[in-house]
Image (cartoon, rainbow, N blue to C red):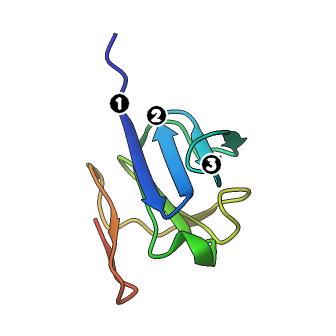
Amino acid sequence: MYRKYSWLFDNQDIFVATSTNVYYSSDYGNSWTLKTSPASGIVSICSQNVRQNKVFVATSTNVYYSSDLGSSWTLKTSPASGIVAIYASYQANILI
């Protein structure tokens, strides 16, 4: 069975998102914490800087934002449906 996942890392901090869950490691992947998931159908995860606790997750129809490393999520306005990836630039722009 094929499983789709998305990941991001910043030094020792790593996030992995499956279609239904978000996991976080602060020790190079030696141990993992299951974080709250904003929705099912996650297609992408990104961050401008994990050290600032800011993480974005996208489903095919919505974008969610966390300012506490994925402990809670806020639904952001989505520009369109059919999202396949999300990217955060260092200039604070979110590209979908």
Type of residue at label 1? Answer: Lys
In this rendering, is residue 82 above or below 74? Answer: above
Secondary structure under tag 3 reads strand
Residue at 65% across / 55% down in the picture? 26
Can I make out residue 63 in this image? no
Q: Nearer the viewer, residue 73 or 29?
A: 29
Q: Could you tell me the amino acid type at mark 2?
A: Ser
| Disc assigned to residue 19 | 2
Q: Quadrant of the C terminus?
A: bottom left
Q: Earlier in the sequence, mark 3 or mark 2?
A: 2
Q: Position of residue 64 (x, y in %)?
A: 53, 61
What is the CA distance from the residue labelled 2 to the residue labelled 1? Answer: 7 Å
The residue to which callout 1 is attached is 4
Question: Horizontally, is 16 left or right of 27 in the view?
Answer: left
User: Where residue 81 appears, x then y in whole percent?
Assistant: 30, 53
16 relative to 53, above or below = above
Residue drawn at x 46%, y 68% is 47
Given contact means CB atoms under 8 Å apart, are the residues at marks 2 and 1 in contact? yes
> How many marks overall?
3
Q: Residue at x 67, y 39 (%)?
A: 31
Q: CA distance from mark 3 to mark 2?
A: 18 Å
- Residue 61 as seen in the image, left or right of residue 65: left
Residue 25 marker = 3
Q: Nearer the viewer, mark 3 or mark 2?
A: 3
Compared across the picture, whether 39 is left or right of 85 comes to: right
Q: Residues within 10 Å of mark 1 (few under 14, many from 20)?
A: few
* Mark closest to the chain's N terminus, 1 or 3: 1
**Element class at badge 1:** loop
At which x and y percent is residue 95?
28, 71
